[in-house]
Image (cartoon, rainbow, N blue to C red):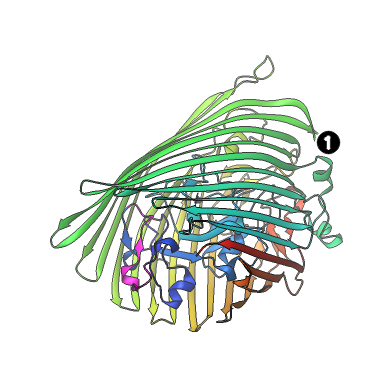
Amino acid sequence: MKLRTCIAVACAAGALLWDARPTPAQQAQGQGPARQAQAPDTTLALDSLSVTVLRVPTRAAEAPFAVEALWRDATERARPSLGIDEAFRGVAGIQVENRYNFALGERVSVRGFGARSQFGVRSVKVIVDGIPATLPDGQSSLNHVDPGAVDRVELVRGPASALWGNAAGGVLLLESAPPTRSPMRAAAEVVAGADGLLRLAATTEHAGDASSHRLTVSRLATDGHREWSAAENVRLAGVYRHRLNGGEIRVVGGYTHYDARNPGALSLAQLEADRRQAHGFNVEQKTGETGTQAQLGVSLRRTVGPGVVEVSAYGVTKDLENPIPPTIIDVDRLVAGARAVFHATTPVGGSGLRWSVGVEADRQRDDRLNHENVAGTRGALTLDQLETVVSSAVFGQVVLPIGERLHALGGLRYDRFRFEADDRLVDAGNPDDSGRRDMDALSPSLGVLVEVRGWARVYANFATSFETPTTTELANRPTGAGGFNPELEPQRTRSFEAGVKGDVGDVASYQIAAYRARVEDALVPFEVPDAPGRQFFRNAGSAVHEGVEASVVLSPLRGLSARLAYTVTDARFERYVVGDVVYDGNRVPGLAPVRFDAALSYRSPAGWFAGVDYRRRSRTPVDDGNTAYSPGHHVTDVRLGVEGLRIGAFEASPFAGVTNLFDAEYDAAVTVNAFGGRYYEPAPGRAFYLGARVVFGGE
């Protein structure tokens, strides 16, 4: 596949599409406003929808990139809440692998970027309720995210460096519901299902004349579908908003405690013998992760002179214990950051030139201890070092209408990173491995969009991205030495994308995009015999990601909606040699080349609803040599429920569902380049669940 005519997402940040009463197709796709801000007697066309997470407020019709935005109503949330993959059914361009392993978390890849991640999320910038879940070194952890509380998701596909930095795949925003406008409202939710699943949640909300707040506490526990895969997550989250004269201040905070076991990936022989087993060495070494995390963010938005200023600051603290073969890792982490942005509009030749400038700075401090793993207990200390990452950036963006049908968008960002390691385990036989790595990049982007017709808007753009290795990737050295790997370099991407999008009356909306991204010094994982299950990283020479994405949102009848997505990803090594082995032309492992997703739902006037999710994946290569594959599969989930049953002073919404309805045997995820052929992470079979949400008070 040669997609030479493409363009790369220039400014990729995320999109908040504000609308008071969207058309049915737009509503199904989530192109609506924050619900509390809706004007009940106003109807806005697509041309009036605003993209506000971009540094410059931009109409959605003018944005030259691929974006998805979804509201999650009762129909969408009638799922077991086991992972954020449930929020992206029927969305093109994103591959979310729920490993059903809470010690590792979901693997998220966008356009093939992020598939190398052994744990957490890489190559995709993640923002949760305004607080970055992505650390300054580019690593994201979603342990603190309650999938059942996610009310809105947004995805921008393509390089995000022009506005967010240190991400090649795109930007993912997760938002919980805003506080109610009611004087007082309370809700409780319970979900129970197979494999000991039990999720309990309670929410209280209050709104006054100028302020409002929302507080949620939840607990999720499961025995897991495999041996040694039990997990428990306890979360507390809150938001407070206060309206000011000409602006608003928002405070968001949360606390999480989690404890999860890691059953490990299996070889083909193990998989065929018993799909529910854990790898024996993982059980012996008591692998898993236990941690606590707290975060707090404050943001202020206010009119200042001719424009609007946005100032925000956040802090995150996290402690984790992570036994893996053959090491027990302890990390005490502290992260803090701040951002300031100013945007305004300047008249230019009869048009409004919208522009924005901003600065940001972040600091990450990891106090890392590694011990030998002796049957799950701490042995000899093998690493004691303090790791610090300091990042700073300046950026700007302009949006210029050129005539009535042509719109241009340009962005420029400069990032600088300083990685430092202070080796505190030094003796006569262990030299001082302290060191420093400096990395920087200038990331431009440029895009144009032409309104050919009301139902067709053609866009194209070019962008670059810059992605550093994480501290974990730098610190994991095959030699076992401390400090940072001096040979591991950041990967850089140049991407082109072209696409068309539009609406067909009130019945359908669609997006089609084609892209080509060339990656230099691609970061690739591998394992060594002395540390099975632990991944190290090296740079491949170059790789090329090409693809086509098509999505359609349909609302042919009142209450009936469907999201259909077809994704083709052709990611291959262009130049990659390890010793005498040449991998040129091989597919990048961990990516399904072809994916089809469909999410259908029906809401009756009487209040009951039903939904069906269907996912099909082609076979997936699991190693650089493309010598082994995870088979292709298709999975179907169904759910039904009733919303708004009135029982005295309460309003109840019960629901039930079946995941993997036809009991397909498939791999939920794969471990790329695993030693001993242990590539496969089996998914659960058919599973049933029941749930209900009860609300008291409110309008």
The residue furthest left is 349
| Disc 1 residue type (three-letter) | Ala
Residue neighbourhood size for the residue with mark 1, other residues' Cα within 10 Å, grouped as few (<14), some (14–19), many (≥20): some
Residue 352 in the image: state x and y as whole percent: 20, 59
**Residue 625 appears in the figure:** yes
Of 231 and 509, nearer the camera is 231
Question: Is 114 placed above or below 440 here?
Answer: below
Residue 343 in the image: state x and y as whole percent: 28, 49
Question: Is 237 placed above or below 690 here?
Answer: above
Q: Main secondary structure of the magenta part?
A: loop
Q: Residue at x 65, y 55 (%)?
A: 201
Of 635 and 311, nearer the camera is 311
Q: Which residues lie in the magenta part?
A: 39-55
Residue that mark 1 sits on: 375
The answer to if 54 sits in the magenta stretch is yes
SS type, badge 1: loop
Q: Choose top left, top right, bottom left or bottom right for residue 623.
A: bottom right
Question: Is 211 placed above or below 531 here?
Answer: below
Residue 675 in the image: state x and y as whole percent: 74, 47
In the image, is 142 to the left or to the right of 40? right
Residue 424 in the image: state x and y as whole percent: 62, 20
The residue furthest bottom is 557
The answer to if 297 sits in the magenta stretch is no
Of 522 and 548, nearer the camera is 548
Q: Residue at x 32, y 49 (%)?
A: 247
Of 200 and 478, nearer the camera is 200
